[in-house]
Structure formats: structure tokens, C-alpha cells
Image (cartoon, helix red, strand yellow):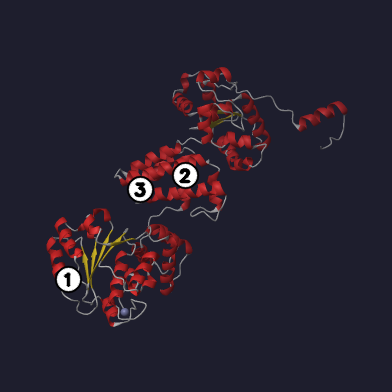
Amino acid sequence: MPYQVLYRKYRPKTFLEVVGQDHIVKTLKNAIDNDKISHAYLFCGPRGTGKTTIAKLFAKALNCLSSEDRPCGECPNCQAMNEGSFPDVIELDAASNNSVEDIRNIVENASYRPLQGRYKVYILDEVHMLSGSAANALLKTLEEPPAHVIFILATTDPQKIIPTILSRCQRYNFSKVSDTDMKRRLEEILKKEGLEYEAPSLDIICDLADGCVRDALSYLDEALAYSEGLKTSELIEMFGLLTLDKKMSLIKDIKAHRLDDALVEVRDLYRKGIDIKALTQDLIKIFKDLLIYKETGSIDLLSVLDKKRAQEIATLYDTHSILSSIDILLSALDAYRKGQDVLSSFEVVIFKLANIKEEAEIKISKTTVFDEEIEIERPKKKEDIELDLDELVLTKEELLSVLKTASKEEKNKDLFIYEDLRELSFDPKKRKYFSLLKDTEIFADNKDMIILFTYSNEALVHQINDKMNNQELYYFLNDEFGIDKMVYAINKEVRDDIARSFRHIDDYDLNGIVIERYPKKEGKKDLEAKLKEVFGDVEVMED
Ligand SMILES: [Zn+2]
């Protein structure tokens, strides 16, 4: 037997086999059972949601000879329709038969009695494609239809149908098939075909199909042509999909302001044929999960993220930033719809996402409130900062001298701080350092100093450089991580400036610059030594 595509092979032969559209199926079945038949139906909805399938089933049910459960699929009429040889169901695609002559033919024909069944059923697909005069010709028959004629009009675009036709029809709105219904159908088919499948592969197909059964089965066909059974890894490769980890790393790059990396990645994906629109939708799903996780702490309610991933990025965002991210992504979808260039729209999205301010920052810059954890007043004007705040201020020369002796090795040695940061957020005594460090990255690192960079958070620069905070941070890094280095924060402006100056570093006199550390704290060890010095060999009691 020649291979039959799944969509045809598993086209529902009874109402029971229809995927989704439960309420429509139920209403139509009732109409059949109670013999309350209207003369014109309009099925509206996105492509692949079952409009023609249900239209055909309904046509079949109208002519089925069985006394119950129509269409039975067994009686001579049902069988003739299965084979496409039933004379009284006439299917027409209005996209290709849209002239007034085509419709006049139908109208003329409609007046003859059915040859074999009870009703003559006309299924007109894509009915919004009819020309104006053709639509008017149809309207006449719809107004006074012969008793034996039933029209089922289907359309993806009901707004293009003239109101006089709309008002003659009983209208049904088809919706996209839910992933749950779709998955159930895919599982049934795979079982009937005796094929193995990995559960996540069904999610992938549902995602790709976006509520369209026909597409889902085509993807399934394609995947099965590639190998026996469904393997997640193969699907990812075949359909040029982005794995969740790739999307996560894109989000992390954007959040950490590694925008050059993010842009290179996205352009590369675009070249490889990744659907940027689908990527945008996927990112919305991730942010939605993140929001749910942040607000409810529930893992069960998440649709794409697992616990590990949710926790991983939840620390990077506050609720306000997540909501702003979703807004930005939604308006990008809108921009694509309006025909704007997808790649460049998405590139703009990257910058917008990277520059979202956290709610705390907005409050600080707008109202000069105290940060509850850090308690440093954020003055409004730059002059005020210099007057009011006791901040560590490094000269350009000092910064350049650090830059000159900075090395990748020093930086890599210190990077582990960030890995341990999240733990700190749970410790009330150390949360402050988590807040100070979490939105920074190491810009330059030598044996004396770590220069931290923060892109969008201006307040944070001042908080880190505030002398009291700065000193505490110094002791903290020393105690917690054994790092004996001063810390200094810079914003984008300063970073760009010293990066520019670094190119002409020979123009600067960097001789004799020493980065001084804060005086050593009297640690327990020092205290012990002092006691020994004074009292001789004593045992220090632990408290
Ligand atoms: Zn039948």
C-alpha cells in the first residue's frame, strides 16, 4: 500500500475523532439528532483548526443512512463520501472558483434534487475570496434556498465577507487546537502506527504547529521520514530549533549587557533560518514562567522552565523588569505584524531589554528614597553627589594604572564570586553584598583592585563607591572569599572614557600611583596574637 500522509490517513471519519472544537461538534451533533438543520453555516477560524474536516463530517452526517451516531462511517452513503464519490456533496475552493460564472453554476445546479442523499451540501472554502458579483450571486440563493440545499461556508477571514451573507449564516468560531488536545491526538496516532516517541518531542511538534492540526501532522510526517520514531534531538536539528538552553543563554547575555555576543548570536541564528518571530514568542513564554515563579513560587504552573532554570534566572530579574520585558517582546510581535523587518526589530528589542531599569532603581532616581538594604541616599544632581556623598573617587590615571596591570588571570581567579552570590541572598547579614554585586561584572582586575562595571544601574555605582559600603565590601571579600583587593565601580560613561584613553596610555603619567587599601581589620587571629603578646600562652575561649 502506498504511503499515505498522516493528515489524510487520520482525517476524522466520525465526530468522535475530531481534535478540539468540542462545543462546535456538540452543537452540530445536536442539530443532526434533533433534525434542526439550518440552510447556511459559516465556519470561521485560523487555518488547520478543522473547519473543512468538520464541514465534511457534517455533510456526511446529513446524508448518513444510520439512525444514530451519524455519521456512522459504514453505510453506503458514508462509504461513498469516504471515497469521494458521493454526488451530493460538492466542495469548492472559492480561492480558485471565485468568478460570478462559477457561482451561477452552483446556483443553477442547486435547484436540482439530490441524486443519492437527503441533502445537497455545498462546502465553499475560503469564501472571503469570492468576487463582489460572485458573492451577490450567492446571496440570492442564500436568501431563498431550496429545501434540499445546505451551504457550509468556511473562511479564515470573516471580516472580508459582505454583511448580507454573514447575516444569512449560522456562525461558528473555530479556535486554535489546544496543546493538550493536540498531544493526545499525536499520541493516539503514534500508538496506532506502533512508533516510539520521546515525550518532549510532542511538545516541540505542538509548539511548531501552533494549534494547527494539519501542520502538526505534517511535522510528524516529516520527522518520521527522517527516522523511525520521534527523537527530541533530531527534531531540534531538523527544524532548526533553538534549545531552551540557547534561549536562556541569550537572556543571560542580554541581562549581563554582553550585547555584542547577543547580536552576533541572533544574526547567526537568523542566517541559519531560525524563525525570529517564534523566538520572540518563546522568550515571552520564558518571561511569563519567570513571572509565575517569582510571584507564586510554584513549579507546577510553569510551561517551559524547570525548577533549576527558573531559579537560575529568577535572581536576575525583579517583577517589574519581567513585566517590562514581556511588554517589549509583545510590541515586537506587533511590529513584525505590521511588516517591519524582523531581524532589525529584534535587534532593537535586545537593546530595549538590556536597558530596562529595575523598580528599585526607578524609585531611587525618581524620589530620592532610601534603599532599605543599603541605606544610601541617592541625590538628584551630580553636583550634589560630590558634595553630599563620601565616595571613593579614583582619578583617570589611577584607573588607567589598574587597567595597565590588569590581567585575564586575575579576573578569572575572582569570577567565582558571582557563582557564590546567590547563596548570599539568603543570608540576611550578607544580602547587602549580594545587592551590591549582583548587577555588576568585572571590567578590570589586577593584584590590587577589581574595577566593577554596571551598565544601567547608576545608583549602584554610587552605592559601591560610598566609602562606608566600599570599606565593608573590601572586608567582606577578604573574609568571605580571601580576596585582598579594593573594589571600585564605574558606569558606562567612565568605562568608555577610560577605554578610549587606554589607547593613548603613553600620554598619561602613571608613575608612582599606588592603590591604597583600607587598614586591615583586627581579625580573630590578630586578636589572639595580641593576647598572647600580653598574657603569654593563654587559651582563647570560643564564645
Ligand atoms: Zn452513515
Q: Of residues 102 and 206, which is closer to you in this image?
A: 102
Report which quarter residue 216 is drawn in: bottom left
Mark 3 vs mark 2: in front? 2
CB at mark 2 closer than 8 A to ligand 1? no
Give x and y (percent) for residue 240.
Answer: 38, 55
Disc 2 crowd rating (10 Å Cα; few below 14, some 14-19, many 20+) is: many
Neighbor class of circle 3 (other Cα within 10 Å; few <14, some 14-19, many 20+) is some
Q: Quadrant of ligand 1?
A: bottom left
Mark 3 residue's CB less than 8 Å from ligand 1: no
The type of residue carrying mark 2 is Ile
- Mark 1: which amino acid? Ala
Which label belongs to residue 270? 3
Secondary element under disc 2, as helix, strand or loop, is: helix
Tell me the kind of residue under disc 3. Tyr
**What is the distance, in whole Å, between disc 3 and disc 2 at their CAs?**
17 Å
Q: Which residue is mark 2?
A: 251
Please indicate whether residue 539 sits to the left or right of residue 184 in the image. right
Q: Which residue is mark 1?
A: 110
Earlier in the chain: of badge 1 and badge 3, it is 1
Instruction: Name the quadrant of the N terminus.
Output: bottom left
Mark 2 to mark 1: distance in Å?
60 Å
Whether residue 441 is visible here, answered yes or no, is no
Residue at disc 3, secondary structure = helix
Q: Which of disc 1 and disc 2 is earlier in sequence?
A: 1
The answer, for residue 95, to whether it is visible in the render is: yes
Please report whichever mark, 3 or 2, sits nearer to the chain's N-terminal start: 2
Q: Is residue 151 above or below residue 369?
A: below
Residue 50 appears at what percent x and percent y?
33, 65
